[in-house]
Amino acid sequence: MDLQLHIYQLKILIRLVKKAYRDFRLQGVLDSTLNSKTYETIRNRLTVEEATASVSEGGGLQGITMKDSDEEDEDED
């Protein structure tokens, strides 16, 4: 049975995952190590949960999203 995360759980998990990813990048961990299958699975799940929450809650995430400013910086490189 696949249960949906509560909106508060989703907000906290998105913040934790993004912060941990940024902190590891700042410490010099290689992107090949950071972008493991496990991380991609977690990121994809949170993205799906985010989309589901935005449809059912009507934008209850209040600006918190898995879309990261780091991704925009990589596009500019």
Image (tube, helix red, strand yellow):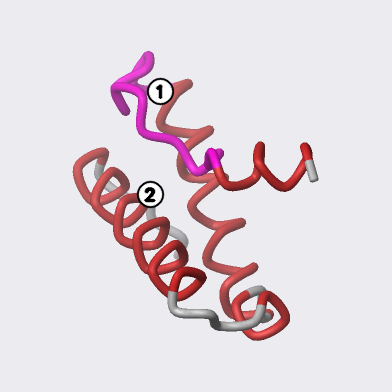
Judge by depth and name the residue closer to the eye, 23 or 7. Answer: 23
Q: Quadrant of the N terminus?
A: bottom left
Q: Position of residue 73 (x, y in %)?
A: 66, 41
Residue 77's disc is none
77 lies above or below 57? below
Indicate the quadrant where residue 54 lies: top left
Which residue is the extreme one toward the top? 58
**Can you give x and y, in whole percent of width and height, for residue 22 in the image?**
44, 62
For the residue carrying disc 1, how many other residues have a C-alpha within 10 Å: few (<14), some (14-19), or many (20+)?
A: few
What residue range appears in magenta?
56-69
Query: Is 74 rendered above or below residue 26?
Result: above
> Where residue 43 sits in the image (x, y, percent)?
56, 59
- Relative placement, left or right, of 12 versus 44 is left
Q: Is residue 54 left or right of residue 31?
A: left
Considering depth in this image, is 69 or 50 the residue closer to the camera? 69
Whether residue 68 sits left or right of residue 9 in the image: it is right
Q: Nearer the viewer, residue 56 or 8?
A: 8
Q: Check the image and report above or below for 60 versus 29.
A: above
Seen at 80% across and 45% down, the residue is 77
Q: Which residue is mark 1?
A: 56
Predominant secondary structure, magenta span: loop
Q: Which residue is mark 2?
A: 4
> Magenta includes 16?
no
Three-letter amino acid code at disc 2? Gln
Indicate yes or no whether the magenta region holds residue 68.
yes
